[in-house]
Amino acid sequence: MTPIAPHGHGKSVAVRRNVIAKYNPCKSFTKKTSLGYMNSYDAPLDAVLHVSSAHKTAFKKAGIETVRDLLFFFPARYEDFSVRTSIKNLSAGVHTSIEGIIASITSKKAYPRRIPLVEIVVEDSSGKTRALWMNQPYIAKALVKGSIIHLSGTVKQNKKGELYMVNPVRNTSRAHTDEHTERIISYDDDTAEPLIPVYPPVRGVPARILPSYIQDILHLASELPDSIPASVRKTYNLPEIKNALFHIHKPSTMAWADAARKRFAFDEMFAIQLHRVRMRTNLSTQKSFTIPFSETPITDIETRIAFPLTGAQKRAGKHILKDFSLSHPMARLLEGDVGSGKTLVAIIAARAVTAAGGQTAYLAPTEILARQHLREFCKHPFSGRIGLITSSECRVFPSKARPTESVRISRAQLLVWVADGTVSVLIGTHALIQKDVLFKCLALLIVDEQHRFGIEQRNRLVRMQEKQPHLLSMTATPIPRTLALTLYGDLDISLLDEMPPGRKPPETHIIPPEKRESAYEFIRNTIKDGGQAFVIYPKIGLQSEEHTKPDKPISEISASMKAVVEEHKRLKEDIFPEFTVGMLHGKLKPREKEDVIAQFRAGDIHILVSTSVIEVGIDIPNASIMMIEGAERFGLATLHQFRGRVGRGGQKSYCFIFTDSKTPKTLERLQALTKAKNGFELAEYDLSFRGPGELSGSSQWGISDIGMEALRNIKMVEAARTEAEKLLLSDPKLAAHPILKERVEKLEKQSLHFE
């Protein structure tokens, strides 16, 4: 590999040596290079580059502060200028590259917002086309009329049928000199241009400058130690880190780029699997609350419900009860499709624990869901009382005054009963994990939709106990096998892949704009026959619900509320004036939300207009229609959660998906909802369908885009798991692998389970 010579932003050798001496306290790892002694990858960027204060601030906001950070800031994609299409053969909607001569350059302001617009006409031997750049006025100064330019982007078509490109990636080549004035470049010109990396945007750092910063430090990649053992690299034909870094930032072919991405994807999976395997090993050495195995909790609950348990519920129940009989704590994920009966399995586990004298804590993501779980638990007898704790109220069941329903009590009284063991099951939200909530003998922690809770919060309950409680995590979001192996590699997994008897999946239809009125009429007739309907409205201006952060900014909540308020008014006054239309959004207080849900459950509200607050767990048995507006703004997993809210009473149910989008990619993605038989099938489709950086929940899981790419490759994930197990057998403390040890310890500080 030929190192990249520093240029442009590089500092002098003398300056670099001074910086190196400052950031190199451990001389035993140094290597002499043309720049002096350099082995500190944690040196700040401005120590080795001329970085303006504005760019330094912008990089810092993007999480890029050191040489290592910038080296590992990978391209999102590549533009291949060696594969070109003649202008004559361009087609709308196709992503391609063209090469031609700049015939004209125009710079102006676009109406009505006066945005700077640069427009050029490009011609080759087959024809002409236009390229436009919005809000990038500097491009006009960078281009020269008569020079050769390579462009790569998606071809668009206007109403007149004219083809053009908007904001294409450009690669300006040699000048069109006088001796060539009679020659218009031919498509057959075989001059090959390299692949051009396209990086994710860093707000405040121009896209044209970002690659040059990386090129100026790329030669330092040769000093990085390799975290993957040589034997593992050889087994799976993975390039060394220095070569991989070179070829991911400056590949000569896509094959080299793919090889580099494969190496870094494996690298991330390997570290994660080491973390997971170590967690499992550590857990096996801890003591827990042991309960002799018995199937009585399963058979006993079957006598108390009106329908038989599914085979999957029985299997999951047995898995949990067998885990309880071991000396070390259980760590199990209960993964079930929407409506598959997870709560009943949780009740089986809690009853087994309380019968043996232990206590159960049940963490729910919302107050609405916590109260719903309280109602379900109160239907079954427990050894001890059942408590509820939220930020707005505390309740207990049963009471002497009202033996058949829960009653409100003071927080102080509830905490006394939890501490002395009177309350054997405590259900709650974040209020459950405050410092003053102390258990006498916490034997089981149930976490519902665990990624909605902070890691430190979950750990707080665990640390306060003499023995490690058993952990049962539950999710209603089906997870592809590779994702489950990666994210929950430290947990055993039980699948609820069967639906309770009589439960039918909703019939799903994509409704085009011209069929909207027909859909309204169908909803009207269904409600007249006694049914109820949900109407879900998205946030305005968001591409996908899955890309939002858990802590929503006030502006997002306000936009969401405004959209729901407007839709509520329209449906109530213009579309369904004969029905009662309710409204649910994030600005309502917990008690107000509960009141709305109670009215809807009682049938006093016929149509409920809501934001995505109803995504998880709300159970309205009589609801039979789910109507989703702006469906293209939601991810498939979220849409599947929505439609799981209807048909829970066994009646035929429907999900109507409304979208104004006509893009083939969006429609193909939404069509998957109409074809998938269950959430597991849909999850696998979602994983294969989405591109790098678009994978469901990549930000919330804490895995990079390149790491998420590996999740399409089950062999790679399994190989990383196998190699992690082998390495930890020979080196349990990773003493001989300090780089890996540092990475794993960093992961351990970050998570109990990935967010």
Image (tube, rainbow, N blue to C red):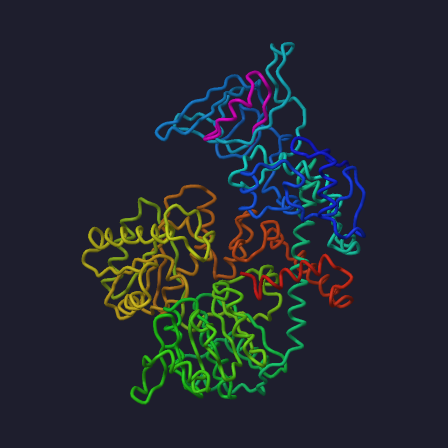
User: For this rendering, which residue is in front, 650 or 387?
Assistant: 387
Q: Residue furthest bottom?
A: 400
Position in image of residue 57 (x %, y %)? 54, 42
Q: Is residue 4 above or below residue 369?
A: above
Horizontal side, residue 319 vs residue 193: left or right: left
Position in image of residue 433 (x %, y %)? 47, 72
Tell me which residue sits at (49%, 26%) in the image. 131
User: For this rendering, which residue is in front, 184 or 280?
Assistant: 280
Position in image of residue 397 (x %, y %)? 36, 83
Tell me which residue sits at (66%, 29%) in the image. 193
User: For this rendering, which residue is in front, 536 or 244?
Assistant: 244
Q: Quadrant of the N terminus?
A: top right
Tell me which residue sits at (57%, 72%) in the image. 332
Residue 149 lies within the magenta run = yes
Position in image of residue 278 (x %, y %)? 67, 67
User: For this rendering, which residue is in front, 13 or 139?
Assistant: 13
Horizontal side, residue 162 vs residue 224: left or right: left
Q: Residue furthest left?
A: 578
For the image, the number of numbered tags is 0
Segment tinted magenta in the rendering? 133-152
Q: Is residue 409 above or below residue 755?
A: below
